[in-house]
Image (cartoon, rainbow, N blue to C red):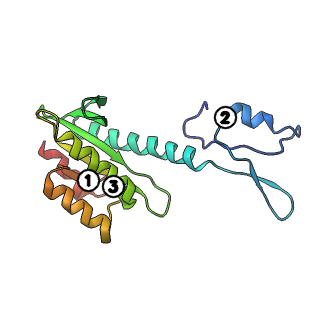
Amino acid sequence: MSDPHQLPLTLADSPSGTGSELEATTGEEEMHGTETGAEGDHRPVRSFQASAGIQGRQFAEQCDTLLGHMGFDLDGRRVLAEVGVEIDQQATSPNGRVVWFEYKGSVQGNRPGLRRTDTLKKAIANGALLRAVEAPAPYVVITSHLPEAGSGAAMLRAALDLGYLTDVICLYDPSATARLRRW
């Protein structure tokens, strides 16, 4: 796909009647056709996975921008093969401290960010695994949405209390992002 901000879509019928022009330009294999409206018109169907991937990249760009504005030097992704964890961003703070960041966010859906318990569990599992690394850096999760109550909030509290996560920062909360200055 040439434009990473354009959601992939496909049409069953194109002006030529083949439907191939749009599919050829997106190059996406995960498309699922069209929906047919009451008048027989064809509307493109957006792939949930492709849309989620685009939102994830956009959220990561927002996180990187925030960290850059706060004076962090961005070192990029880091794979810690000895524990099977990939860090979204290793960054060096203005004070010279290395911090590992995990990005969990989106702007759409019923349960964005850490409101999805499976997403929260993955962040917690990564944090637990990182404790097996000799001299691990602080592991900070930046999210678009925090769990509000229930099992998600309980899991998050426990993970913070156990030290699996150093901090969890909501990108859209200025009082939370101000905590990034402590490194």
Residue 149 visible somewhere in the drawing: no
Q: Rounded to the nearest whole Å, what is the CA distance between mark 2 and mark 1? A: 35 Å
Of 89 and 125, which appears nearest the observer?
125
Q: Residues within 10 Å of mark 1 (few under 14, many from 20)?
A: many
Q: Rounded to the nearest whole Å, what is the CA distance between mark 3 and mark 2? A: 32 Å
- Coordinates of residue 122 in the picture (x, y in percent): 33, 49
Residue 31 visible somewhere in the drawing: yes
Q: Residues within 10 Å of mark 3 (few under 14, many from 20)?
A: many
| Secondary structure of the residue carrying numbered label 3 | helix
The residue at 30%/43% (across/down) is 102
Can you say whether 32 is above or below 18 in the image? below
Mark 1: amino acid: Ile
| Secondary structure of the residue carrying numbered label 1 | strand
Q: Earlier in the sequence, mark 1 or mark 3?
A: 3
Mark 2: amino acid: Thr
Can you say whether 69 is above or below 164 in the image? above
Horizontal side of residue 91 vs 147, given as left or right: left
In this figure, which residue is indicated by the disc labeled 1?
Answer: 169
Mark 3: amino acid: Leu
| Secondary structure of the residue carrying numbered label 2 | helix
In this figure, which residue is indicated by the disc labeled 3?
Answer: 120
Q: Which-is-in-front pick, marks 3 and 2?
A: 3
> The C terminus appears in which quarter of the rendering?
top left
In this figure, which residue is indicated by the disc labeled 2?
Answer: 26
